[in-house]
């Protein structure tokens, strides 16, 4: 899993929960105080109602990209563990998985037509006789290639 939202990149080792629907919810848990300081600085600049872009890769490998407004923003610390939760109201969303699997219909039809219009040909290797091999050996007699194989 991976999430990039509000100019914050969150790796899978920090992510505890991701849910996507009308609301995108990302919850992270940070145990290292230095890492928390990094996240805290970024989160402190955000405000509810702010517009933001996001990109999320789910555990199944689906990539979802879009934009929305920050609805809820929370951060907490408890006994050496720090966390935050960001909720975004999704306005525009697209799954990049759909784009990879879909091919424009026009291209598919054109390639099928090209295949059908081409006559089937099978490439065959030319016949090589012993006389041809002897002529080739004679041609290479003084070359470096013949000296190496001896």
Image (cartoon, helix red, strand yellow):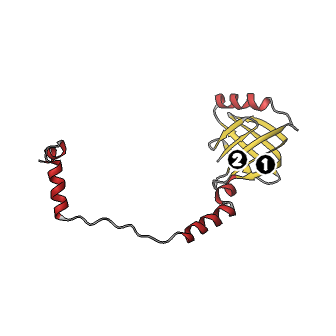
Compared with 141, 132 (above or below) is below
Task: Identify the element where label 2 is drawn.
Answer: strand
Circle 1 Cα neighbour tier, 10 Å, few/some/many (<14 / 14–19 / ≥20): some
- Of tags 1 and 2, which is closer to the observer? 2
For label 2, the crowd category at 10 Å Cα-Cα, with few meaning under 14, some 14 to 19 and many 20 or more, is: many
Q: Earlier in the sequence, mark 1 or mark 2?
A: 1
Q: Nearer the viewer, residue 122 or 64?
A: 122
- The mark found on residue 117 in the picture is none
Circles 1 and 2: CB atoms closer than 8 Å: yes
x and y percent of residue 128 in the render? 23, 64
- Above or below 13: residue 136: below
Q: How many marks?
A: 2
Secondary structure under the numbered disc 1 in the rendered image = strand
For the residues labelled 1 and 2, the Cα–Cα distance comes to 9 Å
Residue 81 is situated, as x and y percent measured from the top left of the image, at 68, 36
Q: Is residue 86 left or right of residue 117?
A: right
Give the labeled residue for mark 1.
24
Query: Closest to the observer: 31 or 127?
Result: 127
- Report the residue at 71% width, 32% height from top: 39
**Does residue 88 appear to the left or right of 129 in the view shown?**
right
73 or 4: nearer the viewer: 4
Q: Position of residue 20 (x, y in %)?
A: 76, 52
Q: Residue at x 17, y 43 (%)?
A: 143
In the rendered view, tell whether residue 130 sits above or below residue 13: below
Q: Position of residue 13 (x, y in %)?
A: 62, 42
Horizontal relation, residue 68 to residue 102: left or right: right
Q: Quadrant of residue 11?
A: top right
Residue reaching furthest to the left: 150
**What residue is shown with label 2?**
56
């Amino acid at each position: 899993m991976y999430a990039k939202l509000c100019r914050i990149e969150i790796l899978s080792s920090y992510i505890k929960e991701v849910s996507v629907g009308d609301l995108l919810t990302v919850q992270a848990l940070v145990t290292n105080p230095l890492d928390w300081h990094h996240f805290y600085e970024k989160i402190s600049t955000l405000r509810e109602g702010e517009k933001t872009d996001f990109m999320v890769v789910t555990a199944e490998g689906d990539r979802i990209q879009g934009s929305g407004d920050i609805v809820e923003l929370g951060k907490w610390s408890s006994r050496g563990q720090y966390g935050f939760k960001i909720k975004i109201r999704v306005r525009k969303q697209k799954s990049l998985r759909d784009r990879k699997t879909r091919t424009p219909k026009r291209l598919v039809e054109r390639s099928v037509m090209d295949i059908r219009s081409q006559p089937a040909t099978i490439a065959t290797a030319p016949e090589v006789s012993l006389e041809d091999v002897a002529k080739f050996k004679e041609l290479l007699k003084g070359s470096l290639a013949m000296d190496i194989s001896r």
